[in-house]
Amino acid sequence: MSSSITIQPNLLIERVLTIEIVRVTERAAVSAARLRGHGKSKDSDQAAVDAMRRELNKLPIDGTVVIGEGEMDEAPMLFIGEKVGNKTGPKVDIAVDPLEGTTLCAKNMPGAIATLAMADAGTLLHAPDCYMDKIAIGPGYPKGTVDLDAPPEENILNLAKAKGVKPSEITAILLDRPRHADIIAAIRKVGAAVALISDGDVAGVIHCAEAKTGIDIYLGLGGAPEGVLSAAALRCIGGQMQTRLIIDTEELHARILTMGIKDPKKKYEIEDMVRGDCLFAATGVTTGPMLRGVHFGKDMIETETVVMRSVTGTVRRIVAEHREFGKFHLD
Ligand code: VTB
């Protein structure tokens, strides 16, 4: 007796794209890594952008960059609204950060990554390149355990209670910025620990959902593009996140109107930032808690990538040995 499995074309292409996007972040990471530690953050960013764009244009998608490297007039590549892909496949929204942590890469410090998220057209939040207030925790907690509008102390105490530990056993991660002085003081006042990062808050948010990192909660203001990317990752692996754009200039007010955002003070849940299923991938540029950085071997280049798919919640870690472009160290 023969059995047959019908795979819907859209589902199949979406599964295939899971592996295809790995190629995109891998190439961006390798290009950026060539300039690791050179002190030139703009150059390594541009190298990552160029590589990511080249690879995206090979994919069977009809894609639009909705979170990108700035606006059309100021960024030559992967600007918001740029069309990518070979137009043979599904219409998709793409959020990119070809080099998240340009300073980390320039200084060869831990945690620089190349990252992107992909979802059906019209389902990713079109956010401008502004600040975003964020709170995130990992999976397994009742909805509403923390709230963006509650004081940090209250969030820490509620989270400790939900986790069944003392507040002193909670660790909060924040970007190390003067603007976070009050939040840091409030967290420490209730006895919780603070972990400070100099850059890289996409990984910062994801750490909340990775038990091995020991991070329980992300708090504070980071980039809005990074916020949408981390929301995509949490949509895949679980966790809670609330955000609000910081629209504090006339220019930003005008800009968000053109992006379809009517309420500048709207509090976003993950489902508002990523309104359907998505794919997320990140490749390490410099070694950090989440990913190993690019390793240049004698005749090959090794990369580590994490790729996630929200339909199934599958997380794959792909360690790749690139011989074709490792051999001559070309890419
Ligand atoms: C974060 C971080 C980035 O910008 O989004 C941060 O993830 C926010 O802006 O790596 P400020 O640096 O102004 O605080 C980065 O540090 C750099 O893009």
Image (cartoon, rainbow, N blue to C red):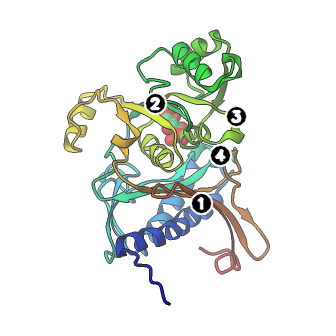
* Amino acid type, label 4: Gly
Mark 3 surroundings: few (<14), some (14-19) or many (≥20) residues within 10 A: some
- Closest to the camera, between mark 2 and mark 3, is 2
> Residue 29 — which label?
1
Mark 2 surroundings: few (<14), some (14-19) or many (≥20) residues within 10 A: few
Residue 41 appears left or right of 278: right
**Judging from the image, what secondary structure is the residue with disc 4 in?**
loop
Residue 181 appears left or right of 271: right
Mark 2 or 4, nearer chain start: 4
Cα distance in 3D space between marks 2 and 4: 30 Å
Give the residue at mark 4. Answer: 111
Q: Residue at x 53, y 69 (%)?
A: 19
Give the residue at mark 2. Answer: 143
Mark 1 or 3, nearer chain start: 1
Cα distance in 3D space between marks 2 and 3: 21 Å
The answer to whether the residue labelled 2 contacts the one labelled 1, judged by CB atoms less than 8 Å apart, is: no
Q: Can I make out residue 322 in this image?
A: yes
The answer to whether the residue labelled 2 contacts the one labelled 3, judged by CB atoms less than 8 Å apart, is: no
> Residue 214 — which label?
3
Is label 3's Cβ within 8 Å of ligand 1?
no
* Amino acid type, label 1: Ala
* Amino acid type, label 3: Gly
Instruction: Give residue 23's position: percent from left, percent from top.
Output: 55, 69
**Image quadrant where one finds the C terminus:** bottom right
Cα distance in 3D space between marks 2 and 1: 35 Å
